[in-house]
Amino acid sequence: MTERQHGFSTRAIHDGQSADATTGAVNVPIYASSTYVQEEIGKHKGYEYSRVSNPTRTALEVNFASLEGGTSAHVFASGMAAITALCTMMKTGDHIVCSDNMYGGTTRLFNQVLVNYGLEFTYVDTSNPANVEGALRPATKLVHIETPTNPMMALTDIRAVADICHNHGVELSVDNTFMSPYFQLPIRFGADIVMHSTTKFLNGHSDGLGGVLIGTSPKHAETFAFVQKCTGGILSPFECWLLLRGVKTLAVRMRQHDANGREVAIFLNHHPKVRKVFYPGLPGHPQFELAKTQMTGFGSMISFDLGSLAAANHMLKRVRLCSLAESLGGVETLISHPATMTHAAIGPEGRQKLGITDGLVRISVGIEDVEDILADLEQALTAV
Ligand SMILES: Cc1ncc(COP(=O)(O)O)c(C=O)c1O
């Protein structure tokens, strides 16, 4: 008889996190040790040096692999360090197809660093899977997508793109930062690798950076572990511990983010000062039907257009409860201006192509009382 798999919340709290064998401590300790005593040459308890592996990190990696439904997970010092590690699977001359609307830092890494090492990138609107197929070349090794995209909230059909990739012997990686494994499981839809900036919803408290790559094959596990060991951009035991603590409440946090997100989206959608709202949970979103099939919630990331830089600035200067800050996914509501913050690096032309106007504002709705968030937005919008 096969054992029933535990539910998401149970795995978030328990997987990788059994009580400490020596002391019985309920929580995984922070193993603040760079090295480990060996009994004799080559005889040790599985740990030799903390760049290679560390027990607090192992606990977290087991947990993340379980939540995303992968076979391995490897954590890095930030989301960008994780994407960099992912790209070390490539060799000079290899080609990567990616979403044209991604986090600006990812585009900056590709265009200003990795192209110097002979990697080639093609950016397409992956919300139409035919564009992905059209961009594939014999040298294509990877398709990398974000869904929903940052900040336009456009979706990509993961199953359709995964099928195209696999027909051509190409792997698909998905940046799942905006949804978290609670609302979207790309591996179920055929993705080969899932990546997160754990800085966001997985941590949930805006108190630590991190990144993760979840793999589905022994080759992924071997490659990402080797990159950790060779390049050293690993996550510290303290930040692994913060994540272990944060992830235990992921399910309850995400449910509240989603409930608040839906209310804020409806409020903005009816507000006379708001020209347009980008949120996959609104029936007017062009991919509302797809959202309902590949996501189990809509989350709390919303973008909205106020028409001009001046209007956005007036509003953003006036928020009191919402904090004007980069980043997302924390318990507190964060509000930001993509054109001058997260997407400054892609330049005015790049932004125009993607529809990122100067009046666009992005909100990461927190889990405060939603009435307080709405009241703050209402008073701030009177300044527009
Ligand atoms: C979707 C997405 N991917 C990757 C990153 C990069 O992550 P980090 O800031 O942890 O390096 C971010 C950061 O905002 C992001 O929003």
Image (cartoon, grey):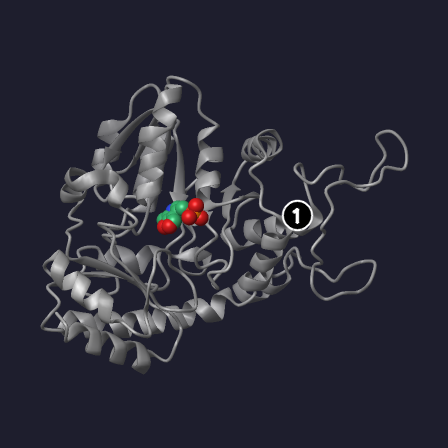
Question: Would residue 74 be found to the left or right of residue 343 on screen?
Answer: right
Closer-to-camera residue (31/140): 31
Task: Identify residue for label 1.
Answer: 58
Residue 71 in percent (x, y) is at 57, 43
Task: Say which residue appears at 35% left-offset and 58% top-offset.
Answer: 295
Q: What element carries label 1?
A: helix
Question: Would residue 384 be found to the left or right of residue 190 on screen?
Answer: left
Three-letter code for the amino acid on which mark 1 is drawn? Thr
Task: Say which residue appears at 38% left-offset and 29% top-offset.
Answer: 170
Q: In this view, does 354 lie above or below 220?
A: below
Residue 236 in percent (x, y) is at 61, 47
Residue 171 visible in this rendered orientation of the protein: yes
- Image quarter where the C terminus lies is bottom left
Task: Say which residue appears at 72% left-offset and 42% top-offset.
Answer: 34
Residue 5 visible in this rendered orientation of the protein: no
Q: In which quarter of the image is residue 165?
A: top left
Residue 5 in percent (x, y) is at 59, 60
Q: In this view, does 204 lie above or below 371?
A: above
